Amino acid sequence: MIFLVIHFPWQVVLLNQVTTKFNEGSYQLTLALGNCILYFLLIS
């Protein structure tokens, strides 16, 4: 892994950013789904 960091630092940074964005998106999606479920439980 250190070998990759030395030779492809921009790819490691890019991968890190994509992973972070994906995690943020998943978290927001989870919150949105949770809010929808809560809303449906309240109105039903």
Image (tube, rainbow, N blue to C red):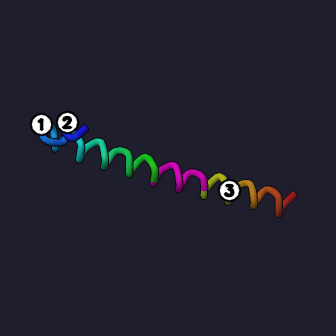
Label 2: element kind: helix
Q: Which residues are magenta?
A: 24-30
Quarter residue 6 falls in: top left
Could you tell me how far apart the alpha carbons at marks 3 and 2 are, in whole angstroms?
A: 39 Å
User: Mark 2 touching mark 1, by CB under 8 A?
Assistant: yes
Which residue is disc 1 drawn over? 7
Q: Amino acid at mark 3?
A: Gly
Q: Measuring from the top left, give residue 20's x and y in whole percent.
A: 38, 51
Quarter residue 3 falls in: top left
Q: Nearer the viewer, residue 9 or 22?
A: 9
Q: Is residue 28 shown in magenta? A: yes
Using the image, tell me which numbered label, if any, was put on residue 4: 2
Label 1: element kind: helix
Q: Please identify the dominant SS of the magenta region.
A: helix
Q: Amino acid at mark 1?
A: His
User: Mark 3 touching mark 2, by CB under 8 A?
Assistant: no
Q: Is residue 6 shown in magenta? A: no
State the residue lying farthest toward the front: 2
Q: Amino acid at mark 2?
A: Leu
Q: Nearer the viewer, residue 12 or 4?
A: 4
Query: Dot 3 surroundings within 10 Å: few (below 14), some, or many (20 or more)?
Result: few
Which residue shows up at 19% across the image and 36% down it?
4
**Left or right of 16 on screen, residue 27:** right
Q: Measuring from the top left, give residue 22's x and y in whole percent.
A: 43, 46
Which residue shows up at 79% across the image and 56% down it?
40
Could you tell me how far apart the alpha carbons at marks 1 and 3 are, in whole angstroms?
A: 42 Å
Which residue shows up at 53% across the image and 56% down it?
28
State the residue lying farthest toward the right: 44
Which residue is disc 3 drawn over? 34
